[in-house]
Amino acid sequence: MRPIFHRLWSVLLAGLILAACGGPSNRDAPPESQLRRGIGTSPDSLDPHQAEGTWANDVIGDMFIGLFTENEKSEPIPGVAESWTVSDDGLVWTFKLKPWEWSDGVPLTADDFVFSFRRLLDPKTTGAVYASLQYGIKNAREVNGGELPPEALGVRAIDPQTLEITLTAPAPYLPGLLKHYTAFAVPKHVVETVGEKWTDPANIVVNGPYKLVEWRTGDFIRSVVNERFPGAADLCFKELVYYPRSDHDAMVRLAQTGDIDMNNSFPTGQLAEVERKLPGWPRISPMMATTYIVANTKRAPFDDTRVRKALAMAMDREFVTDVILKGGQIPSYNFVPAGMNGYPETARFTWADMPRDQRLAEARALLEQAGYGPSRPLEFEFIHRSTGDNPRIAPALQDSWATIADWVRPQIRQVETQVLYNQLQQKDYEIADTGWVADYNDAYNFLYLLDSRTGPMNYGDYSNPAYDALLDQANNELDLTKRAALLKQAEQLILDDAAVMPLLNRVTQMLVNPDITGYADNPEDIHRAWFMCRKPKAPAQ
Amino acid sequence: MSDTVNASPLARTIARIPWGFAARRLIAAIPTMLAIVTIAFFMMRAAPGNPYSTERRLTPEVEANLKASLGLDKPLFQQYLDYVGNVVQGDLGPSMRNKDKTVSELIGDGLPVSLTIGAFSITIAIFAGVGLGMVAAVRQNSPTDYSVMGLAMLGISIPTFVTGPMLSLIFGVWLGWVAAGGLDLGRMTFETLILPIITLALPQIAIISRLTRASMIEVLRSNYIRTARARGLPERKILLRHAAPAAILPVVSYLGPATVGIVTGSVVVERVFGLPGVGQSFIDGALTRDYPRVMGVVILYGGLIILFNLIADILYALLDPKVRYE
């Protein structure tokens, strides 16, 4: 017994010594030429056609470039496209491509783009979550639905340097769509030979400024400069490291110790605290995102417009933004966030300027007209998402509604976020919180959600032929001013109907080291690393 | 048995391992694992939602193709049979959400980190716990005893999701001695792992020290220790040579539950410190309804716990001559 006992001790002791010598204590600052960035969540995939989410876009957009790309303000600028012409009816766009090479030296041709668009929309490409974004391309919907072969898609190569895209309706916002990652070129010659594993660091070939070299799941993703990218020599950062971590408190600590330069978020409701710990780091600016309440318009009591309108009027938006969230969010009386491209002025609830007392009285009157009162109380269940600020907002809304009258009795129930979306898509709910972040900078990307033909994504199951007609009309309008007016008219319609009850416009909550230049606040919250530099250190005093 | 008389201590030890017992326990582990897999499989599927319920909705055609490619279109029981069949052949399947990786790759990425943290935590917990427990027992009812046991009580009652951020704040941010979180670009170094290891070890140190103290006090009152003292053996020798090996037995039998504590604790600690371990993978998998990923981790955790319980039982047999498993 004794020898074994001693052996056990010595093994354990050896382990302890090993632990103590596990590595040199080395608290050196990371290299200046490395940009370290927290992206919040681990990407599902780095394949532009399979990816989902802004966090994946942060990585992919530094590696791939489409016909268009964006500047630091996220405005579309030509990417691989050198020049383009648009037919008179606005339907046929012809692009001349710049001479461009993939990172393995193979020339990038129009054929790569044809291959890429077909791959995106081919229903056999499993998991192309965002394919529907490119439904503006002729036959895209039919190809994605398996009704037509991929070859029928309205994208063709006229010659290796000329690409033609045919649309179903004029889309003045096409450059904004073509800079989305679903429209990035993928290397045909690699995808066809390697297959699904083409995004492995060993196989990947890119056409953007940085190239993936390492991906440790849940730990970090590392990219280095693609030397074949035009202008590669001028890039300030030679290496990018992305950290997919969702614990924002932990990321704030890493920012404090100088281990990261940027993070996609900071703990909500702690703006003042974060500003104190990291002066100059928090970057807050309006985003193309609306948090709103949606009611099931096909189910009582919310099939009655008066009930929806009463609830929309009673919501104390300022209390939510100024007292609860305190993070710069903007109370919203419009569905489309202000400041979207080609949409100079949003619609607005007609009663938006009414004092709250008067609004509450009106809301009560509306509910009484709808037949509710002490003998017939209005009872309903409000479900809300379990993530982010939503659990803190829900009780405030409950209180807002209960203030209308003591016979308005809202119940609230927290639901796991994924489950909530599932319920919304299946219309298995009464009233719920939800939100929308625009995929591209155009008001239509918000308004199409309430089109009766949108299906599961039309959470409230709203159907109004007049609304659908207005959207169709806007989609075929080439004059941008007239188009904006039509869209605004449509937005006014859904606000008057209280088909959605906007709560607030979201703001970006970035943490950015003040020493980083080339970062600009923008409503799309897209920040490409190739514009960024680090200010040279001031000489020691 | 004459050939074992002159054999080396190692050979004698090996001869004492209850091989038959170990084999029987391993065979008994098969139905246990099957039960774990079955329960986890159906619980996971009973949870509302699916891997594709997000804000964006797939077109029905794409969703159908996707489901077919992952076998989700088959009846649930058929899926279960397929899954068990694949697992038996060592195939944990593809990840449903992490499209570029298989479950084995995902677990393989995280395992070195989790094992390192776990192994060091349990080692430190045993050393520190046994040491502190013995000191407390020898100085029973002294200020030393009270302070050690008081600290142990704290260690048991403060959860790791409180100690983790606290340690990170104090030693990472304020003092700047070690990393506040994360690894050093994938490298496991002393300064990146020390805080998570300590965080994970603290509750186990607390439990083990209390176990050791109680057991040591009992042993110190026993007749053979009294005899040793009466014969004038030096106190140090009595404690280390005669009392300690007997007092450590409850600690050995606690090794199984301790492994469970370390495994479940690592899920929290990895999240708090942003470490790319299996525990993180487990949480991400559960939140995104990545069925195969969660199942893979469940199988790994189940296997580890069964294995360490077995090791603890065998160690117990080796340390305590009274124990016979035959």
Image (tube, coloured by chain):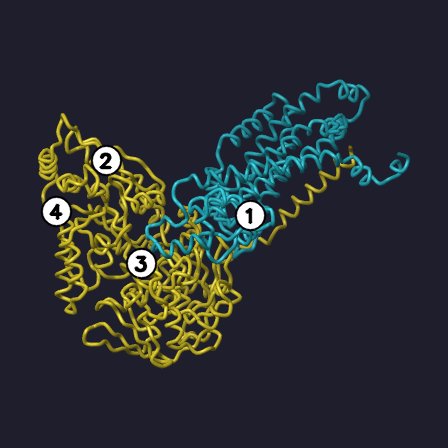
Chain colours: A yellow, B cyan
Mark 3 to mark 1 CA distance (whole Å): 34 Å
Q: Mark 4 lies on which chain?
A: A
Residue at the location (61% across, 43% down)? B120
Q: In this view, does A352 lie to the left or right of B16?
A: left
Dot 1 and dot 2 within a common chain: no
Identified by mark 3, the residue type is: Asp
In the image, residue A396 lies at what x, y percent? Answer: 24, 37
Quarter containing the N terminus of chain A: top right
In this orientation, does residue A172 appear? no
In terms of sequence position, does the residue under pointer 3 or pointer 2 come before the other? 2
Tell me the distance, in whole angstroms, between the alpha carbons under discs 4 and 1.
Answer: 55 Å
Q: Mark 2 points at which residue?
A: A398
> What is the CA distance from the residue labelled 3 to the residue labelled 2?
31 Å
Q: Of circles 1 and 2, which is in front?
A: 2
For label 4, the residue is: A352
The label number, if any, that marks residue A525 in the structure image:
3
Q: Which residue is drawn at 19% across and 64% down?
A: A475
Left or right, A178 with respect to A63, comes to left
Classify mark 4: residues with Cα within 10 Å, few (<14), some (14-19) or many (20+).
few
Q: Nearer the viewer, residue B320 or A114?
A: A114
Q: How far apart are marks 4 and 2 (CA)?
A: 20 Å
Disc nearest the viewer among 3 and 2: 2
Q: Residues within 10 Å of mark 1 (few under 14, many from 20)?
A: many
Callout 3–callout 1 Cβ contact below 8 Å: no
Residue wearing tag 1: B193
